[in-house]
Amino acid sequence: MLELERRKVPSRTMIWLAPVLAVLATMVVGGLVFSALGYDGFAAVRAIFIDPLITLRKWQDLGLKAAPLVMIATGLAIGFRANVWNIGAEGQYVVGGLAGTGVALATWEMTGWWILPLMCIAGALAGMAWAGIPALLRTRFNVNEILSSLMLTYVAVQLLYYMVNGPWKDPDGFNFPQTRIFTDAQMLPYLSGIGYLNVPLALVISLVVWFLMARTMLGFQIRVVGAAPMAARYGGFSQRRTIWLALLAGGGLAGLAGLFEAAGPFGQMVPAFPTGYGFTAIIVAFLGRLHPLGILAAGIILAVTYVGGEASQSSLGLPSAATGVFQSMMLFFLLAADVLVGWRLRLRRRVTE
């Protein structure tokens, strides 16, 4: 009979090697699964995981996809390190985009350098406010933040549909459910060869969060509250304040990422704005071991699946769900690897009397 036995000291090497093994297992098993379904499975693996990395013209697309994932995952990792489970980053992302769009529409006939910063502030504050709801429910009524933050995602999406089909619908948009296209003063600067400004900003944000988490008392407080709540209380660290801080940080970065997408690749607000980045960022956070620098690498890996998945639909005829299948496999194998890092399988003989 197989049993799990806890390891006395998990291998630190295997802790960091597990994400690599999870990606490799995803590629092998994914290739076998799609081969069994009648596709050229290993050509699909090459198209999804390899081609985007070796094709220079696709690197800019990788940055475009990786930037929001890295920003959102970095914010989520702050909460996860504090044992605060914000699962509603998708809703905070949508609300941040909506708030920035509201500022853009209000200033549509204006010009000035101040418009885009105002949109950024609105996006971040809206994401923080949306994350503040589960923070209030958790700290005041002990409501599970997993459920409350997740349910608020669907509220945010329905709010988006209402706004683009109603008050914000473009009067010159031939009745399509979309807002006006943003003006030049409301768009993110485009950097030749790199992409929109959010790409380098995502890198800067990761480095700043790494410094805060690793080199400041604030980061130490977050880590202690998450790892040892009793010791945190003994040391005078407030769990209530840490919950608020973790959720507001995650919501603010998700809202800012939403604004960057609205003022960058989308250039307006449309019903297709919810792209699942908030949910995929959870995979990115854990694949990157909740470390801001690890999240950078994990964000690129998940961006590869997006870019490669889109290309494989046209080149190999794979279904649009292929990307989600590979991403789900990656999370499954990562969780399985984490179990084996902390536990070992033992074969025990059943004792019969």
Image (cartoon, grey):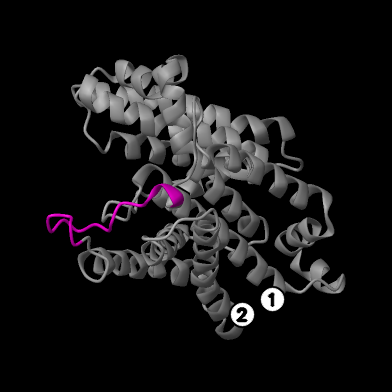
Give me the residue at 55% from left, 47% from top. 71
Please state the horizontal and vertical placement of residue 246, each as a whole percent of the image: 64, 64
Range of magenta residues = 171-185
Please state the horizontal and vertical placement of residue 218, each as a whole percent of the image: 79, 60
In terms of image quadrants, where is residue 200? top right
Give me the residue at 49% from left, 44% from top. 69
* Mark number, residue 139: 2
- Give the answer, above or below, for where 131 lies relative to 21: below
**In this view of the protein, which residue sits in the foreground, 126 or 158?**
126
**In this view of the protein, which residue sits in the foreground, 335 or 170?**
170
Q: Which residue corresponds to mark 1?
A: 240
Predominant SS of the magenta segment: loop
SS for dot 1: helix
The reply to whether residue 347 is in sight is no
Contact, CB < 8 Å: mark 2 with mark 1? yes
Please state the horizontal and vertical placement of residue 206, each as a whole percent of the image: 65, 43
Q: Is residue 14 left or right of residue 55?
A: right
Please state the horizontal and vertical placement of residue 129, each as a whole percent of the image: 52, 72
Q: Is residue 205 left or right of residue 91?
A: right
**In this view of the protein, which residue sits in the foreground, 138 or 196?**
196
Which amino acid lies under the numbered mark 2 shown in the image of this protein? Thr
- Whichever of labels 2 and 1 marks the residue nearer the N terminus, that label is 2
Q: Residue furthest right?
A: 235
In terms of image quadrants, where is residue 4? top right
Residue 175 belongs to the span the image colors magenta: yes
Q: Is residue 194 left or right of residue 241?
A: left
